[in-house]
Amino acid sequence: TGGHYSKVTGGYGSTVTGGIGSTVTGGDDSVLSIKWFDGKRTRISIAYVGENGIEPNVDYKLDENGNFVRA
């Protein structure tokens, strides 16, 4: 787990959590989550390595709509 604007990395089967503006990376079967602000409230986006194009050992951040994109 990391605070705002951190870089957090986890290995196989990890749960990786970053604050607003963070970059996260996880191994196979990991869960990635990043906090973001939508202009009204704080939200959390979650992605699963191996689903919806999320690849293991790749750095991800969020776009302005809370979607995971390669960093």
Image (cartoon, rainbow, N blue to C red):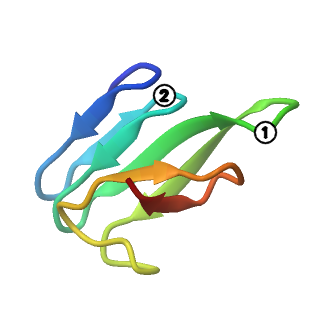
Reading the image, the residue beneath label 1 is 38
Residue plotted at (45% across, 49% down) = 61
Residue 5 lies, in percent from the top left, at: 43, 25
Q: Amino acid at mark 2?
A: Gly
Under circle 1, the secondary element is loop
Residue 44 lies, in percent from the top left, at: 61, 42
Q: Nearer the viewer, residue 31 or 6?
A: 6
Q: Amino acid at mark 1?
A: Asp
Q: Nearer the viewer, residue 17 or 53?
A: 53
Residue plotted at (26% across, 35% down) = 8
Give the number of the disc on residue 21.
none
Give the number of the disc on residue 19.
2
Q: Is residue 7 left or right of residue 10?
A: right
What number of labels is visible? Answer: 2
Q: Is residue 62 left or right of residue 26?
A: right
Under circle 2, the secondary element is loop
